């Protein structure tokens, strides 16, 4: 495993990790919070029954320190405040133009499709060929980036329905391709916008999918550098 990411607040910039506990829900704290509007919809890159597109959220970055009850939110200005503080709330409202606040997960899941998003370096190479330029993994907001070499192939789709062991004790089940939307084109902290990423994916995959979704079959601990194997 070459990169490990967590996004404490849904649709907000996240954090690179060196280790994390994984329970039945997914990475501890991953997308446990969301930006909720006055209608009870959560900020996202698209509008659905549960979510509402809110531009501007990716200008923020969230991080969850060990032992903390809520994430810290770094504002576009560079200031950092607790995510539910008046300063963070005011900045989010100004950026989105909506009456919003950061709330923890309740009866409605904050996940779009599934608990864990997995991507491989082979898939990035596959996309890079079609895109005619490297595409940073951060455009896709994965939890896990596995180093599978540089040969171009959407390797993870060949694992659908199989169990993948990572590290000493974690086992995940690869369940579905990851559908993509315009969010992959957007700028994120440290990553400029690229309006043609989604189009490049569509030339490669008939369903405009890239990477895969996985469920947790057996909880465990993830560490950067852990090896993975198909069971």
Image (cartoon, helix red, strand yellow):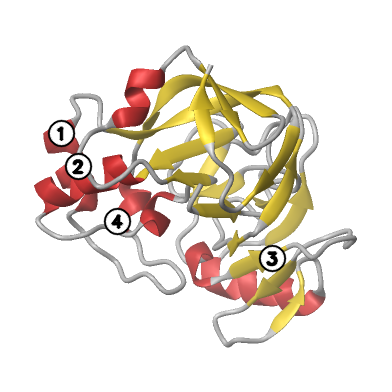
Label 4 packing within 10 angstroms: few (<14), some (14-19), many (20+)? some
Q: Percent from the top left, x then y, of residue 6?
A: 62, 53
Contact (Cβ within 8 Å) of mark 1 with mark 2: yes
**What residue is rendered at 42% in x and 58% in y?**
138
Judging by the rendered image, the residue that carries numbered circle 2 is 126
Judging by the rendered image, the residue that carries numbered circle 4 is 185
Residue 21 falls in image quadrant: top right
Residue 116 falls in image quadrant: top right
In the rendered image, the residue lying farthest to the top is: 161
Label 3 packing within 10 angstroms: few (<14), some (14-19), many (20+)? many
- Secondary structure type for disc 4: helix
Q: Which mark lies nearer to you, 2 or 3?
A: 2
Residue 219 falls in image quadrant: top right
Contact (Cβ within 8 Å) of mark 3 with mark 4: no
- In primary-sequence order, the first of circles 3 and 4 is 3
Q: Is residue 185 left or right of residue 144?
A: left
- In primary-sequence order, the first of circles 1 and 2 is 2
**What residue is rendered at 17% in x and 36% in y?**
202
- In primary-sequence order, the first of circles 4 and 1 is 4
Is residue 158 visible in the rendered image? The answer is yes
- In primary-sequence order, the first of circles 2 and 4 is 2
Judging by the rendered image, the residue that carries numbered circle 1 is 204
- Secondary structure type for disc 2: helix
Query: Could you say which disc has been placed on residue 63 in the image?
Result: 3
Q: Which mark lies nearer to you, 2 or 4?
A: 2
- Secondary structure type for disc 3: strand
Instruction: Give me the C-alpha separation between circle 2 and circle 3.
Output: 31 Å
Q: Percent from the top left, x then y, of residue 172?
A: 60, 25
């Amino acid at each position: 495993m070459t990169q490990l990411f967590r996004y404490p607040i849904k649709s907000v910039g996240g954090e690179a990790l060196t280790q994390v506990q994984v329970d039945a829900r997914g990475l501890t704290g991953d997308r446990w919070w969301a930006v909720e509007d006055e209608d009870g919809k959560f900020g996202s890159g698209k509008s659905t029954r549960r979510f509402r597109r809110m531009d501007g959220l990716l200008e923020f970055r969230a991080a969850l320190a060990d032992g903390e009850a809520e994430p810290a939110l770094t504002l576009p200005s560079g200031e950092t405040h607790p995510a539910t503080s008046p300063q963070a709330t005011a900045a989010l409202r100004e950026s989105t133009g909506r009456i919003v606040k950061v709330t923890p997960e309740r009866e409605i899941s904050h996940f779009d499709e599934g608990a864990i998003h997995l991507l491989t370096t082979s898939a990035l190479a596959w996309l890079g060929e079609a895109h005619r330029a490297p595409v940073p993994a951060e455009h896709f907001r994965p939890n896990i980036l596995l180093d599978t070499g540089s040969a171009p192939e959407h390797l993870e789709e060949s694992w659908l329905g199989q169990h993948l062991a990572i590290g000493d004790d974690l086992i995940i089940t690869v369940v579905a391709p990851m559908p993509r939307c315009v969010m992959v084109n957007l700028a994120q902290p440290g990553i400029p916008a690229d309006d043609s990423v989604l189009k490049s994916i569509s030339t490669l995959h008939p369903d405009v999918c890239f990477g895969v979704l996985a469920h947790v079959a057996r909880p465990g601990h993830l560490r950067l550098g852990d090896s993975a194997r198909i069971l």
